[in-house]
């Protein structure tokens, strides 16, 4: 399952997978343990890790999740109720919030690859140490300088606005070539001469 998930990501599809609700270290299974997917843990309303959220490492020893998002008491449409709503909790409620953020990122910049999306989410997240707000015990990952990922919060709490703004500013297809066309003849003195009645269009380039 992990292999197929990785192949889908490498084919250009961003995959967001709920970490699971097993409430213990080492309980993130497939396909959440796949290397290339974005695995999402759940936060409570105080942005501390939810007591049910599964934690890494994976069976392969990989640090997971990648990020975390609020997943506790999330209001959602109620199945078969017509127009009813209900509050649910779980990493499956946290993951759609991150998926919505990814949709906005791709709307802002359709050229982003799944790896660009994952990197931006991780880089703009607010890092949380394992024992943030007393929700867990200190962990070895927090002692590694500049590590910025642990098996509880991953790279941290997703910041949707920051991620979308960063996505909009990234252009991986930038063409920095420029073509100048002179329709006015250049004189013997290597200057452009404008005669009465000639028009001059001024273009400004800012890199």
Image (tube, rainbow, N blue to C red):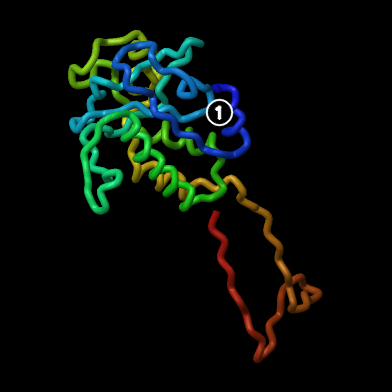
Provide residue 172's location: percent of width, then percent of height. 58, 45
Query: Which residue is at the far bottom?
Result: 197
Residue at x 18%, y 30% (from the top left corner): 46
* Left or right, 124 with reference to 173: left
Residue at x 33%, y 38% (from the top left corner): 159
Provide residue 114's location: percent of width, then percent of height. 54, 37
Name which quarter of the figure residue 76 lies in: top left
Compare residues 123 and 84 and report the one nearer the observer: 84
Number of other residues with Cα within 10 Å of mark 1, as a class: few under 14, some 14 to 19, many 20 or more: many
Q: How many marks?
A: 1
Q: Is residue 197 above or below residue 123?
A: below
Name which quarter of the figure residue 3 lies in: top right
Compare residues 134 and 85 and report the one nearer the observer: 85
Provide residue 63's location: percent of width, then percent of height. 44, 16
Q: Is residue 71 above or below residue 204?
A: above
Q: Where is mark 1, residue-wise?
A: 5
């Amino acid at each position: 399952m992990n292999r197929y998930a990785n192949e889908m990501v490498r084919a250009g599809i961003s995959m967001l997978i709920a970490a699971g609700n097993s409430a213990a270290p080492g309980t993130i299974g497939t396909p959440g343990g796949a290397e290339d997917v974005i695995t999402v843990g759940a936060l409570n309303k105080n942005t501390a890790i939810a007591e049910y959220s599964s934690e890494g490492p994976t069976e392969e020893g990989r640090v997971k999740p990648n990020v975390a998002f609020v997943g506790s008491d999330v209001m959602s449409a109620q199945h078969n109720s017509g127009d009813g709503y209900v509050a649910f909790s779980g990493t499956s409620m946290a993951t759609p919030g991150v998926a919505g953020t990814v949709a906005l990122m791709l709307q802002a910049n359709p050229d982003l690859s799944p790896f660009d999306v994952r990197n931006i989410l991780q880089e703009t997240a607010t890092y949380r140490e394992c024992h943030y707000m007393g929700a867990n015990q200190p962990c070895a990952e927090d002692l590694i300088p500049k590590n910025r990922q642990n098996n509880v919060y991953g790279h941290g709490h997703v910041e949707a606005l920051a991620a979308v703004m960063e996505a909009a500013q990234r252009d991986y297809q930038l063409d920095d070539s420029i073509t100048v066309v002179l329709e006015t003849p250049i004189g013997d003195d290597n200057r452009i001469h404008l005669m009465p009645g000639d028009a001059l269009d001024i273009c400004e380039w800012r890199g």
